[in-house]
Image (tube, rainbow, N blue to C red):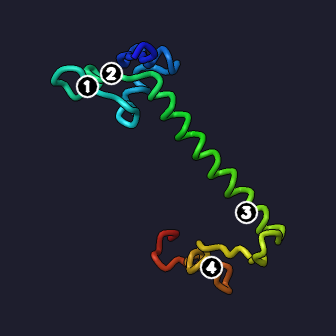
Amino acid sequence: MDDMNIVDSKGLCEILNVKHRTLRDFWRDLPHFFIGRGRDLRSARFDINDVLHHLKNRDYNECLVRQNQETLDLQILEGQAGIPPRRVQNEKRGDQGRARKKKRTGQLEDPFRLLS
């Protein structure tokens, strides 16, 4: 247990180099335990090693997933993934943009009469 470093929220702010109000937003996501009966940030304690391990794994895994997805996207675009590249269709296209078509008279069509 000699390698265990327990700190409160102020000590964790110094180690992570963040402001206390920043830590208040995400402290519940970090590994912690409570001292006494309180269940808020004032009574929370953090093991520095556990917190750093948690943050490194979270960010490292997200980075790997993002890199793998970008590589797969490039392979698909270049046709190297064994899947023929498909045309990307605009999903938002649908009926949008049809409400304000120009009439033959040169005026804008306004079905809700917002432009009058």
Label 3 and label 2: CA atoms lie apart by 43 Å
Q: Secondary structure at mark 4?
A: loop
Looking at the image, which residue is at 67% across and 84% down?
105
The residue at the point 41 percent across, 26 percent down is: 23
Q: Nearer the viewer, mark 4 or mark 2?
A: 2
Residue type, numbered disc 1: Phe
Q: Amino acid at mark 3?
A: Asp
Q: Which residue is at 42% across, 13% downward?
A: 2
Q: Earlier in the sequence, mark 3 or mark 4?
A: 3
The answer to which of marks 4 and 1 sits earlier in the sequence is: 1
- Closest to the camera, between mark 1 and mark 3, is 1
Q: Which residue is mark 4?
A: 101
Q: Are marks 2 and 1 in contact (CB under 8 Å)?
A: yes
Q: Residues within 10 Å of mark 1 (few under 14, many from 20)?
A: some
Q: Nearer the viewer, mark 3 or mark 4?
A: 3
The residue furthest front is 1
Quadrant of image for the N terminus: top left
**Amino acid tagged 4:** Lys
Residue 31, above or below 74: above
